Amino acid sequence: MTTTAPLHRLPVAPSTRASHRDWFALAVLMLPVLLVAVDNTVLSFAVPAISLALQPDATQLLWTIDIYPLVLAGLLVPMGSAADRFGRRRLLLIGSLGFAAVSLAAAFAPSAEALIGSRAVLGFFGAMLMPSTLSLIRNIFVDPARRRIAIAVWAAGFSAGAALGPLVGGVLLEHLWWGAVFLLAVPVLVPLLVLAPAFVPESRDPAPGSVDVPGILLSFGTMVPVILGIKLLAEDGVGFSSLAPLLLGLLLGTLFVRRQLHLKAPMLDVRLFRNPVFTGGVSANLLSIFSLVGFLYFVSQHLQLVAGQSPTTAGFTLLPGLLVSILAGLAVVRAARRIRPSRLVAIGLLLNAAGYGTAWLAVHAGGSSTGLMWAFVFLGAGVGISETISNDLILAAAPPAKAGAASAISETAYEVGSVLGTAVLGSLLSAAYRNAVTVPEGLSAPAAHAAGQTLGGAIESARTLPPDAAEALLASARAAFDSGAGTVAAIGAVLMVLAAALSLVTLRNSHSS
């Protein structure tokens, strides 16, 4: 059985000190990390503008956000294995070129369907980027102490990028159209394509197994139906439409695990999950990102469509949380010398719970923007702490030759958490909105449908009504949205408390030195 070295007991090899070139390579690798993290949340902030411009229904709106991390999550494990086999830097450069090209197409998508399709292809190329970055870091920083710092920077970049999405999106949406958020890929990835060949060393598995085509199909066939089933379960409740994909995904997942256990050179070493510390790290990673993305989904809409803030002002409202996320991720490296990982992860998840609790109080107090700012400060601190520790625990389990596949597990947890944050909490919010909003008479059938589906649809439909009727619709829609937001915040707080308890149990065998 593969064992996971505790965060504080990794052996130190003095002869493997990182050079200045290594740290510069890390800076180059942070470019795709920031981009993919920003891309996961920037679209949530652009939801109001997309709702007004493309007029998607509630399902299309959720799919616009969900399809990217859904495809990405389904392909991370195969792409991590491909990076080990064909070269991590090579796959990073191919993914960067494709991601930049498709981003241009997404920016000018003429319809919701076209945007969803572009986002799906972005997920394909994004899956090439993320396992490559973390596995390259694993092989560049062989000294555990410096690797821990590098992972802290990587995790801080991830959480900071996710939090930076609303701010960047706010500034762009203030002055440009919604498609501008996709153009971020070009100025970020062009420097990567120039600098990576010069500063990032190539690495691969020296003895890769054969390409496991059935394993690739089973991996993708596991992830997509499971996430789709959870999404439908949150939207429609228990029924054939939600249980069938869940059962299909679980069946294919069982076949995938059995296949990997019987291969001499498996695409994914599933035996790692026998170690509760490894499994606990993956769970903490997933749940922390779940809380972050779910929070941003409803807060970004509240600040703009309920509180009436401009995109830029709303982005700056969340800026303190961004800064705290970065600082917490870096500061926890020093704290990890004295405090057990289980306690640090639990503290981070409890801070997430505090963020949701603060958001619940803010929504019920009339939607105070200051209260929501503090809520994101708590959440940012929690994500920064839990992401750094959980990723270090995950990565320490893998031998350098299998870094890509192991990194893919961490990335898959991140993307599954991102999908579930939107799918579960976003679907609950949509359901609560639909049940509470009152749509007046006098609207055309399409306008009435749009107003009953999303807050953005109600705002657009109100423009066709007389002033009194429009004001009544807007008041009902905003009240319905905040009622749902309060419910989501309460559920998020409870889930994070349970997650903290889980981390104390699963990570209890990781000790401080």
Image (cartoon, rainbow, N blue to C red):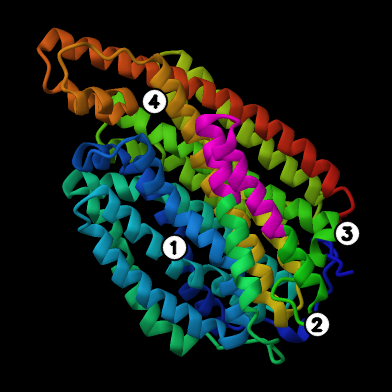
Could you tell whether 469 is left or right of 95 in the image?
left
Residue 237 drawn in magenta: yes
Please state which amino acid type lies under the numbered disc 3.
Answer: Ser
Residue 9 drawn in magenta: no
Pointers 2 and 3 in contact (C-beta within 8 Å): no
Mark sitting earlier along the chain (2/3): 2
Mark sitting earlier along the chain (3/4): 4
Q: Which mark is residue 369?
A: 4
Residue span colored magenta = 226-253
Measured Cα–Cα span from mark 4 to mark 1:
33 Å
The image position of residue 385, as x and y in percent, is 65, 48
Crowd tier of the residue under label 1, counting other residues whose Cα lies within 10 Å: few below 14, some 14–19, many 20 or above: many
Please state which amino acid type lies under the numbered disc 1.
Answer: Gly
* Quarter of the picture holding the C terminus: bottom right
* Quarter of the picture holding the N terminus: bottom right
Pointers 4 and 1 in contact (C-beta within 8 Å): no
Q: Which mark is residue 123?
A: 1
Q: Which mark is residue 513?
A: 3
Measured Cα–Cα span from mark 3 to mark 4:
43 Å
Measured Cα–Cα span from mark 1 to mark 2:
30 Å
Please state which amino acid type lies under the numbered disc 4.
Answer: Ser
Q: Which mark is residue 264?
A: 2
Mark sitting earlier along the chain (4/1): 1
From what the image shows, is residue 108 above or below residue 405? above
Q: Label 3's element? A: loop
The image position of residue 253, as x and y in percent, is 70, 58
Crowd tier of the residue under label 4, counting other residues whose Cα lies within 10 Å: few below 14, some 14–19, many 20 or above: many
Measured Cα–Cα span from mark 2 to mark 3:
35 Å
Q: Nearer the viewer, mark 1 or mark 2?
A: 2
Could you tell whether 34 is left or right of 455 in the image?
right
